[in-house]
Image: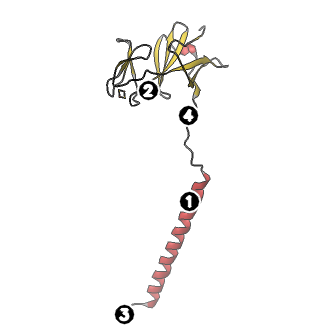
Amino acid sequence: MFIDQTSRRNFINRLGWGVFLSTIGGIMVASIRLLAPNVLYELPKEFKVGYPKDYPEGVHFIPARRIFVLRENNRFRAVSAVCTHLGCTMRWSEQDLAWKCPCHGSVFNEKGGVIKGPATRPLPWYDISVSLDGQLLVDLNKDVSPDHSVVVNV
Ligand code: FES
């Protein structure tokens, strides 16, 4: 069978260029990727959760930060909404005055203490204060007692 030398040469030539350009393209993509730092971005541990006047009496879930902000009269507190068993998001039951975990059934009392397992550790409470602009400021770096609160005249 007759094989055209020119078409074979063209094919090999194009294949070579294809491999060459693919390699250059891969190197360029890898080089550009190196410009972006390989860093895990974490949300700040200290953050504002809005103005006290925006919170009516009761327990308020802040989904973006998985905490609850509680208001009793002019007293504000902050507690974690993360179950201490395996990290599911807790739900507040006004009827039972308890936090309940939908995953494995742990129940925590009003002060975050374990009523029913499998969780064994209480819910952590966080420092809450008022920032210079008047918003409530929660600091996840500072664990506090369940009685810790900030009083704001609203
Ligand atoms: S994650 Fe809450 S009980 Fe398991």
Q: Residue furthest bottom?
A: 2
Which residue matches tag 3? 2
Horizontally, residue 22 falls left or right of residue 37, namely: left
Give yes or no for contact between labels 4 and 1 (Cβ–Cβ under 8 Å): no
Q: Residue furthest left?
A: 104
Q: Which one is closest to the eye, mark 2 or mark 4?
A: 2
Q: Is residue 20 above or below residue 5?
A: above
Q: CA distance from mark 3 to mark 4?
A: 69 Å
Percent across and percent down for residue 112 are 43, 17
Q: Earlier in the sequence, mark 2 or mark 1?
A: 1
Please name the amino acid that badge 1 sits on.
Ala
Q: Which mark is residue 43?
A: 4
Q: CA distance from mark 3 to mark 1?
A: 44 Å
Which residue matches tag 1? 30
Front in this rendered view, residue 81 or 152: 81
Q: Earlier in the sequence, mark 4 or mark 1?
A: 1
> Which coloring applies here?
secondary structure
In the image, what residue occupies the spot 39% across and 29% down? Answer: 88
Percent across and percent down for residue 75 are 54, 9
Q: Is residue 71 above or below residue 100?
A: above
Q: Earlier in the sequence, mark 3 or mark 4?
A: 3
Q: CA distance from mark 2 to mark 1?
A: 38 Å
Q: CA distance from mark 2 to mark 4?
A: 16 Å
Please name the amino acid that badge 4 sits on.
Leu
Q: Residue furthest right?
A: 132
Which residue matches tag 2? 82
